[in-house]
Image (cartoon, coloured by chain):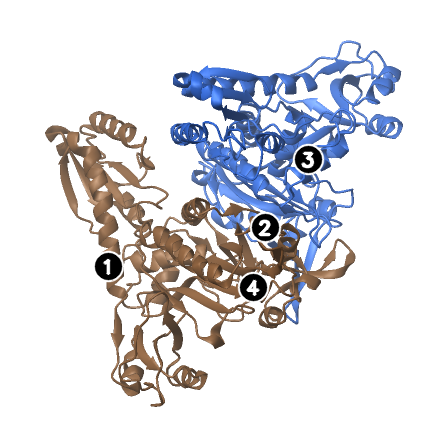
Chain colours: A brown, B blue
Amino acid sequence: MSEELGLTIKKNEDFGKWYLEIIQKAEIMDIRYGVKGFPVYMPTAMTVIKQIENMLEKELEKTDHKPVSFPVVIPEKYMTKEEKHIKGFCDEVFWVTHAGKKKLKERICLRPTSETAMYPLYSLWIRSHLHLPMKLYQTVSVYRYESKMTKPLMRGREFRWIEAHTAHKTYKDAEKQVKEDMTIFENVVVDKLALPFMLFKRPDWDRFAGADVSYAYDCILPDGKILQIGTTHNLGENFAKPFSIEYMDQNGKKKYVNQTSFGPGIARIFGAIISVHGDNKGMILPPEVAPTQIVIVPIYAKKTKEFKTDILKKAAEVYGKLSKNYRVYLDDRERFTPGYKFHDWELKGVPLRIEIGPNDIKNKNLVLVRRDTLEKIIIKEGELETKVVEAFSDTFYELQKRAQKLLTIEDVKNYSELKKKLKNGGIYRIEFCGNEKCADKIKEDTGAEIRGTLFGKEEKVKKKKCDICGKKASIISYVGKAY
Amino acid sequence: MSEELGLTIKKNEDFGKWYLEIIQKAEIMDIRYGVKGFPVYMPTAMTVIKQIENMLEKELEKTDHKPVSFPVVIPEKYMTKEEKHIKGFCDEVFWVTHAGKKKLKERICLRPTSETAMYPLYSLWIRSHLHLPMKLYQTVSVYRYESKMTKPLMRGREFRWIEAHTAHKTYKDAEKQVKEDMTIFENVVVDKLALPFMLFKRPDWDRFAGADVSYAYDCILPDGKILQIGTTHNLGENFAKPFSIEYMDQNGKKKYVNQTSFGPGIARIFGAIISVHGDNKGMILPPEVAPTQIVIVPIYAKKTKEFKTDILKKAAEVYGKLSKNYRVYLDDRERFTPGYKFHDWELKGVPLRIEIGPNDIKNKNLVLVRRDTLEKIIIKEGELETKVVEAFSDTFYELQKRAQKLLTIEDVKNYSELKKKLKNGGIYRIEFCGNEKCADKIKEDTGAEIRGTLFGKEEKVKKKKCDICGKKASIISYVGKAY
């Protein structure tokens, strides 16, 4: 794979190009595959992605979700059962029409999402209130013929996600599921990946096709644009009716279930990690997901090879100690200089480097270098394990602190200030009449969107006047440009 | 989900029907999905399958394989590049021809296997001998329009597998990879799943489309028929040439790489677990892969509720102790009798049951019941942890011993004996001229196939006379009926 090192583009000068350069040079995705919008996930990407998947799957299992796997293909008769759903997806699905040389009797599409694949079986499985709640999830790729420009990890025609589909007795139970999903998301995305997010109830005109209410997890990237990294939809009885998903309640009465679907976008979460935490030297990976958490670099003069044996012995010792609990790589490759190695591992975002040189042998020291600050910490050999724990914890909080700074929400005085401020990106809080026409106006004037109202927190209007049209405002909404 | 319990068909009376009944009643797959050959993997199946995948992935990573993910769709121009490959797969691939309402400019197929998806990128990634060996794997589903009868987990149009694709400097290095693959397979399939297998070099007429040599992992099911649960193909330079995968060697000379592809069939391995280990009461899962390893069933008379509090307290204690190291379920559901629960968990293959009743409270005992023997072991409370370890180990060896019995290989005196014996299934060792005509004759007369010669063990002919045609025999081959 590529051996040219170092980023040439500064993050704050051209974020978009910086992102694409990091994707290429840190060997995340290869976009040269022969079908447009279908990139290849390279080893670093897949290793991180599998970690994120595992973390989310663990949280799902803790909350009694069970894994399943439904076919990648959905027959047209299933796909078209819920009217709004097929209307929303009809331009986006890939159709399989032939097998070998034969034409299929009924065409089948690649799943763009799995509501219509799963719910015919839900209607067979769910009979009684004793079967509820039913909480199933699958970790799969979905396929959408995107017409917008694709961008590695953020918008593609094939993307990895987890989709959890739940069925409940009541609408209220379904609504409670949104809270559980938010906690799952927080436990991983905030507490392990150091990515703050906001959960918005999307406006009515921006719902998932077939949903009663859509909630979406938004985070903000360094260019001030918003990236949606997950959604939970309260589907109400919208799918239960056409798919006949009914249960017998305690009194022997037949009722429709209420459903939700939750979709954390794994690829997008990884895209956000790269974007939010990275710097001009490359990625900075939160310790929990880094494929290599610690790299050990032995340093000795190439010619004199002074202390070489001692240094390599010490390096092996340190490796032995740490590899029990961490993913460690001892980089003793002879053909590269230490300087080259530093750059290489900085580019790839390894959160902690341990350098061992002649002085460290003399003084029984080790040098730790944190990726986030590039700060050198000289420690005594005996302190190794505690200092590593400390460094990881400090790195995590530093990343979280930096990320939190991006997510500052501002109020605006009026529409003209909003328009002016939106030029630099960001999220703004406005008083809003709730009318789609005002949303269209913002979109037209600035390219920004109404992201919705904050979930789980009632915010009261003060001026009671829509910041756009001046008419009566009833809600606080958030506005920003989005990917 | 289904609440009717108990198998109605005996394994030794009708293995095929027994298998289908277990698939349905133990809630493994649901075959009622709306596209033929595309079943749904239910929670128990997915939990076991994920465990098997994890085990194999760990072994692959130990041997320096890295995870990747290539698109599910392969453009026609890639798919048709290696002549024999497309010839082998042209009747089996699903074609995507439309996206939304648009017809695609070039049609794309769903991966039936990923050689032609991956190797165009290998040709970009591999430049120098320093990049070799390159060992990548992905855990995905593949799609083949099977014309044979489908059977849950064993033959479907969508099936889960891992595919590892390696590139090496020499043919010999590629051949060494076969040995590594066999070790990976043994470490999981034999040592954790208690399934013995034989690795055969398939005869020339039974190679993977495009391979130089195909090796296949065969295991034998209780009906005496063989199930192939994995393959390794030495592709030689067959793909390297059309895909231009070349490297510069130490002397600056351009050479083609030599490649292998290794495909453990995860779904089939699970199918073999069910088939080989199961009995008339249901599945028997090897402890390492059981979704629930231990079930605790409190027993008290429904009316008197004698000792109920004590029993439930004890059950919670036992749960607390064991759940740190094992996947444990405390079945305190009030609406079912202990007898119902026993049947339910026996059907689902939970390897160990712990019963706690009034007598156990009085005597400070616990009752362990192993799923494989259904033997009751009364133990003292203090011995719990050591007895669980012992029970799991004993279960594993018992399963292994039983499975090994199925894999008895017999020699035959002559062709008429072979024909007679093949009526009852089984694997037979024959002296063989190596001619495809003889293989055709066996197939025609008996339905059985030449499975090939044993890998890694040179077996010498004694009679030196082909058991079929009587001409000169040069090799020892194995014959059996296969799925």
Q: In the rendering, which numbered label is found on residue B22?
A: 3
The residue at which mark 1 appears reads as A402
* Residue B74 locus on image (x, y percent): 62, 54
Which residue of the protein is positioned furthest toward the left in this rendering? Answer: A363
Q: What residue type is disc 4 on?
A: Arg
* Residue B105 locus on image (x, y percent): 65, 67
Q: In front here: A256 or A95?
A: A256
Is disc 3 in contact with disc 1, using a CB cutoff of under 8 Å? no
Label 2 and label 3: CA atoms lie apart by 37 Å
Quarter of the image for residue A9 reads: bottom left
Circle 4 — which element? loop
Circle 2 — which element? helix
Q: Does residue A247 appear to the left or right of B313 in the view shown?
A: right
Closer to viewer: mark 2 or mark 3: 3
Residue B482, above or below B428? below
In the image, are marks 4 and 2 on the same chain? no
The residue at which mark 4 appears reads as A144
Q: In the rendering, which numbered label is found on residue B117?
A: 2
Q: In front here: A354 or A58?
A: A58
Residue A146, above or below B133? below
Chain ID at mark 2: B
Q: What residue type is disc 2 on?
A: Ala
Is disc 3 in contact with disc 4, using a CB cutoff of under 8 Å? no
Q: Residues within 10 Å of mark 3 (few under 14, many from 20)?
A: many
Tell me what residue is drawn at x 60 percent, y 62 percent: A240
Label 1 and label 2: CA atoms lie apart by 40 Å
* Residue B15 locus on image (x, y percent): 75, 29
Label 4 and label 2: CA atoms lie apart by 20 Å
